[in-house]
Image: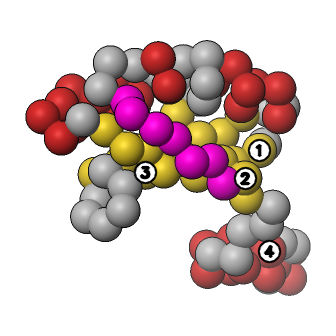
Amino acid sequence: MIKAIVMIQVNADSIPETAQAIADVPGVTEVYSCAGDVDLIAIMGVPKHEDLAELIPGRISKIPGVVATDTHIAFRSYSSQDTEAAFSIGSEDAD
């Protein structure tokens, strides 16, 4: 699964509606409204890189209210949840 983090600038008067429209797009797993340089951050998960090409410029960028996107593709996860899962593999058999 390919994960992408997309920073999205949105017209200020349409943030809630735009965020919901983005969240409703298949492949988008999470959308966060945030303070800072961008208005929304969307997390996406797709099987192939080609799917990102269809999803971001083909769907997300065309949603009313979206002004600009900046996409970052994740290579590896370092979350504590993933680390715990990796170390627990096979531990059920030890009992």
Which residue position is annotated with label 2? Answer: 73
- The amino acid marked with disc number 3 is Ile
Name the image quarter holding the N terminus: top right
Q: Amino acid at mark 2?
A: Ile
Q: Is residue 94 left or right of residue 24?
A: right
Q: Horizontal and vertical percent for residue 70?
A: 57, 48
Q: Is residue 36 magenta?
A: no
- Residue 41's label in the rendered image is 3
Q: Which residue is mark 4?
A: 86
Residue 54 can be seen, yes or no? yes
Of the image marks 3 and 2, the number of the one nearer the N terminus: 3
Circle nearer the N terminus (1, 4): 1
Q: Of the residues under marks 3 and 1, which one precedes in the sequence?
A: 1
Confirm or deny contact between disc 2 and disc 1 (CB under 8 A): yes
- Per the image, the residue denoted by label 1 is 2
Point out the stretch of residues depicted in magenta.
66-72
The dominant secondary structure in magenta is strand
The answer to whether residue 20 is seen in the rendering is no
Looking at the picture, does residue 69 appear above or below residue 81?
above
Sequence-first tag of 2 and 1 = 1
Cα gap from disc 1 to disc 4, whole angstroms: 19 Å
